[in-house]
Image (cartoon, rainbow, N blue to C red):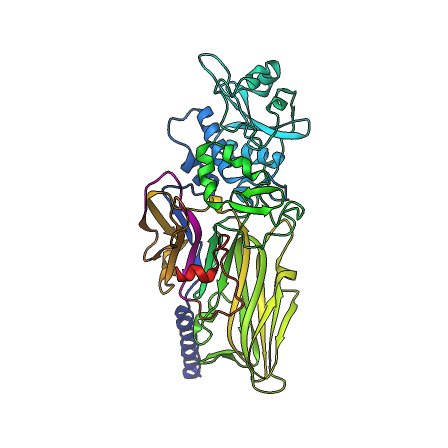
Amino acid sequence: MARTESMRFMACVAAVSACLMALQTLRAEVQEPWVTTDRTVDCSSYETILKGVLKDGMTDEQKALTLYWFFRQRVYHYMNVRESRDPLVCVNVLGNTLCGSQGTCMKGLLLAAGIKARVVSGPGHTFYEAFYDGQWHGFDTFMNFYVMTRGDKPHVASFQELEADPTLISTAAKENRCPPGMAMCGDDPLFFSKHVDVSDYEVMKLDWSVKKNSLRKGEELVRSWWPGGMPLPGTYNPKLGPGPLHTCGSHDRADAPEMYKFWEPYGIPKLAPSTSVSYRHYFNGVINYAPNLATADYKDGLVSESGVKAGAEGLSGAGELVVPVKCSFYISAGQCLFEATCPGEGDAVTLSVSRDGTQWTEVVAGKEPGKKVYAGSLNAVVVNSEAGLHAYRIKFALKGTAVLNHYLLQTYFTHNAMAAPHLMPGKNQVTVSVAKADTLAGADLKVLYRYREAPGWNGEIKTLEKEIKSNPFTFEAALPEGEKLPQMLDLTLRSGTLAWTAEKAWPAPMPPGLTATTAEKK
């Protein structure tokens, strides 16, 4: 009996060891891959924003002005959505909102910097004040407005001071006491001489992080500096254009030079009927996932699998696998392309999609005889109007002797490329980091920048590619010196190689007149 129990115990140990060895052969997902540069602000948290824009020894007024310009560079006025009063969502994802939410976001940034702030309103418009040096001081990022007082020790005027002396506004431009392009979109700056009331909206703080992405072998995350025709429904008015955009676009030329040169490379003529050119608009990106189904790569990050096995032709066996998608940005579209072989009647590969893994919607059933490519839109489930969805799942169900040869899962998302780590003229120190260094082993993680050089942005596409060998990993990107900024195309983080692409695959968004095919040729 003792010997029998001992043998059972040893068998259990061997089984557990085998399971552990099998798990060790599977790579963990690369968690929170993130790119920063020494020339741009890391917008992932309040702490990184403050570290990037504020300097030691700044007065509170200097801090308030610096945060004002930081926000204006990245956010334009367009439309309110449900989550636009979270400053980190507004800066990293939306890139636009209306006056009340802009004032609320600035309140959040100022409070994070240790400066008391409040949201205030006049007739039909909302803005904000910062409290320092014993009094309130008035700002409006929406209309590009603040004015300095006169005298030996000028300061940003309060709205009470402006109400008492409207000439502080009317002569501000002539006396060089206001920002360049004050109220440049046609608003009357004397509006701010009217009495204001305290609104003081609450700052939203969502349980969310822009860094919460992960990469499996055969997966890439592409952030583009261009709209791709797939804005998040509910975030824009179709009467004003094909997606969120600064409808006063041509007025951007009148803004401060340091602002305008940041937007100028991305001007799109006639993007909307309401403006001759749009320099500021929404941006799309795409997550592509195409694992190698002939190896264990397909197991990385799976929710579950049963009854299927990998072979030279792909996955076979009557069973199913459930694949998750995670995206820190707002998912604005989804599609899955797959190739399946169905030798006989009753063989099938069925694709379904779910938000939470409990309710499933069938997308397409591949059951035609022979090897065929199938395409299924996921939009009906994965697109959530206004407040974007951040995760979903797909499920493949295999019947009979069917084989799932390949699949390419594509998730478009809306993000704010104006908060992305673009490259600047001269030397850039680029740093790539991940949450856990040990996940880099075998991940073959790469970072790729694509851009066109100034001043004309019409030359060949430059590609900068680096393999990430340590955590963090830093390298230098040297661009020609000059006044104008380069035109960024996209920034890609990729683990391994996409094992399969298809004819109907979505490309990364491109500038007008430049398609994916022409980009690849250059």
57 vs 64, left or right, is: left
Q: Position of residue 72 (x, y in %)?
A: 51, 35
473 vs 377, left or right, is: left
Q: Is residue 215 visible?
A: no
Viewer-proximal residue among 299 and 58: 58
Q: Position of residue 237 (x, y in %)?
A: 66, 46
Q: Position of residue 287 (x, y in %)?
A: 50, 59
Does the segment drawn in magenta span residue 380? no
Q: In the image, is residue 71 above or below residue 283?
A: above
Quadrant housing the C terminus: bottom left
Viewer-proximal residue among 258 and 324: 258
Viewer-proximal residue among 74 and 257: 257
Quadrant housing the N terminus: bottom left
The residue that appears at 59% across and 87% down in the rendered structure is: 344
To which quarter of the image does residue 97 belong? top right
Which residue range is magenta in the image? 479-497
Q: Is residue 315 visible?
A: yes
Q: How many marks?
A: 0
Does the segment drawn in magenta span residue 483? yes
The residue that appears at 59% across and 24% down in the rendered structure is: 189
347 vs 209, left or right, is: right
* Furthest residue in direction top, as rendered: 151
To which quarter of the image does residue 144 belong? top right
Q: Position of residue 121 (x, y in %)?
A: 65, 27
Viewer-proximal residue among 492 and 398: 492
Q: In the image, is residue 95 above or below residue 339?
A: above
The residue that appears at 39% across and 31% down in the rendered structure is: 55
